[in-house]
Image: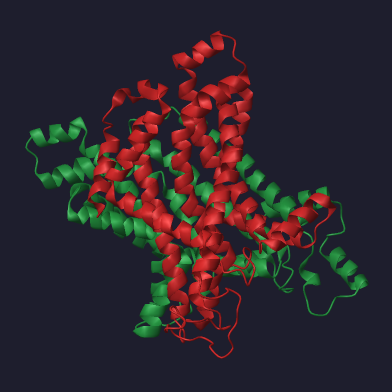
Amino acid sequence: MRTAFVIRRVLALIPTLLLIYTLTFFLMHSTPGGPWDTGEKPIPADVQERLKAAYGLDKPLWQQYTDFLGKAVRGDLGPSYTQRSRTVTDIIGDTFPVSLQLAAIATLIAALVGIPLGVLGAVRHNRPLDYLATFVSVFGISTPAYVVTSLLVLLLASKLHWLPTSGWDGVRSPKVIIPALSLALYPMAVLARYTRSSLLEVLRTDYMRTARAKGLSERSILLRHGIRNALLPVITIAGIVLADVATGSFFVETIYQVPGIGRYFVQSITARDYPVILGTVLLLGLVVSVMNLLVDLLYPLLDPRIGSRS
Amino acid sequence: MAVDNAAMVDAAIAPESPGALGSRAKTTGLWQEAFRRLLRSRLATIAAILLILLALVAIFAPFVAPYDYTAQDYSALTQPPSRDHWLGTDDLGRDILSRLIFGARISLAVGLVVQAVILLIGVPAGLIAAHFGGKLDAFIMRTVDALYSIPSLLFVIVIMTFLRAALATPSGPFMETLSAIDAQTGGLIGIFIGIGLINWMPAARLVRGQAVSLKQKEFVEAARGLGASDRRIMLQHLLPNVVPIIVVTATIGIPQAIIYEAGISFLGLGARPPMPSWGLMISEAIPNLRSYPFMLISPAVALSLTVLAFNFLGDGLRDALDPWMER
């Protein structure tokens, strides 16, 4: 029963990824113009023909579609148009770990601040701390990452000179603070909102009353019965949080000049480097889908009420 | 300030009038009651007033703005706020306040038109899926699920990359007309389509969920028994009853569309210079951040405040309309 469920969910990934690939592939290939006609000096027609042949762009579209797919499955995302000497896989290999580290720190901050903020809001329901927590989270949801990054750079780097204005030096360098904070704000706000409403619902349940009637201390009621149950549904938004961090990185990395996949993606849009766009979309789509899958698979394990019936 | 809002959330969790569905016969009653409940939330009221003011400023922009948003004054480049230029001038000598005021038009237009696009796709999709059920329902909802799993901003960027190039070199009369309008509006048409095409799924899902439970209600059964056509059931019986959820979805969707627009304009895929999109203004301010921070502050505050107001209004509306929405 359980294995059947797991297999079905894993197999369900395939059509999703195929849809992402197909949509992106045909959009990118039907986009008029290419990387070679944006330069200042037009490239002669015969050179363009040879370039196209070299990149396999002269083949029929369906063959390009299946060729790329076949290679992509084996981890080969083909050559980049703008960086002749490196493949898209190389580039992703360089940039993705940077983004991954940044994303990990941002997610950690988001969880460590967002969840307690939500708990605070629910426990101090309708009291000043709740309003403060609510306000902080609505503010976080309303302020896009590029605004947060530029404001933080302005305040912490340009005015106060506490932190560098841009760059990346690994996770131990203070350079990580501004991009990580900017990336964390939105998911933090989402987590806080979600935790608050989830815990508010749990606090009203009968088993909470029973726990209180048993004479347990408020502290252990809240920790063992309240928060533990309230956090279960919060796990379901892990995929959403991850998608927010991924797309937020486009802006944050670009502004703070972090050499991650987000900045590279933005650069490849400006340069019309279609293989890189395609590769990045596939990678991020895969990461988010796998995350959602993991949540789906883990959830029944964490919540005995759900079991393996799906 | 947040007092009433939080109280409303509370009220929403434990609806005051459980039998509210019965009072549906009088539609005006529903909206009057909702409006009354909305006004009880001070935060939502303040937000609504702020947004009405913003809309007025946007509508009457040419009369309110002290300068033309494209007018360059080379004798006043990057001037800090002063009496002549309340919010200063940018690196091309344009008055920032005037650009902000005209920028409000873009943000509001994007917020509203994108919602229209979303509702035009999402509502019929949700209604059709719910009403016909079976294979059609499965097909529509599988598509929605698959599109859902793609980070939407990522996909907006891909679509905008395509649309930008396609509209720059149009082929065929349809694309040529579209391209001409797009050029006229400084790139707005592309934004409307791009963001709308990607974000209709949540609306479809909500409408479907609501309509599926309505389908079992006696009044729909009765209509069917009387021989009403599919079209009639969907338009006369299902649609009016999903309006509250549509209103809430749209209100919550507006700030999202505004953020998307600013984001893709920031990336150079949205509004084209010299259009005074707030996102574009922010991206133009970033290279000058250290020397001329005021170029950043005003568009950033305008953007955040507008989005904040829409979010508070959306929250208030959701709570106000909650008893009429089925979970």
Compared across the picture, whether B265 is left or right of A276 comes to left
Horizontal side of A206 relative to B8 (left or right) equals left
Chain B, colour shown = red
Q: Quadrant of residue A250?
A: bottom right
Residue A266 quadrant: bottom right
Residue at the spot 47% in from the left edge and 15% down from the top edge? B219
Image coords of residue A282 (percent x, y):
62, 54
Q: At x 74% / y 51%, what residue is drawn? A: A26
Q: Measured along the vertical axis of the image, is residue B142 above or below residue A152?
A: above
Quarter of the figure with the N terminus of chain B: bottom left
Q: Give percent across and percent down for residue A54.
A: 84, 66
Residue B97: % across, % down: 48, 74
| Residue A100 placement, left or right of B182 | left
Is residue A250 shown to the viewer in this render?
A: no
Which of these two is toward me, B99 or B156?
B99
Coloration mode: by chain
The single residue placed furthest to the right in the displayed view is A46
Work out which quarter of the rendered image holds the C terminus of chain B and state it. top left
Tell me the residue at 56%/29% (across/down): B127
What letter labels the chain drawn in green? A
Q: Nearer the viewer, residue A193 or A303?
A: A193
Q: How many marks?
A: 0
Query: Percent x, y for residue B196?
Result: 60, 48
The residue positioned farthest toward the front in the image shown: B63
**Relative depth, front residue between B55 and B243:** B55
Instruction: Report the side of B92 relative to B80 (left or right).
Output: right
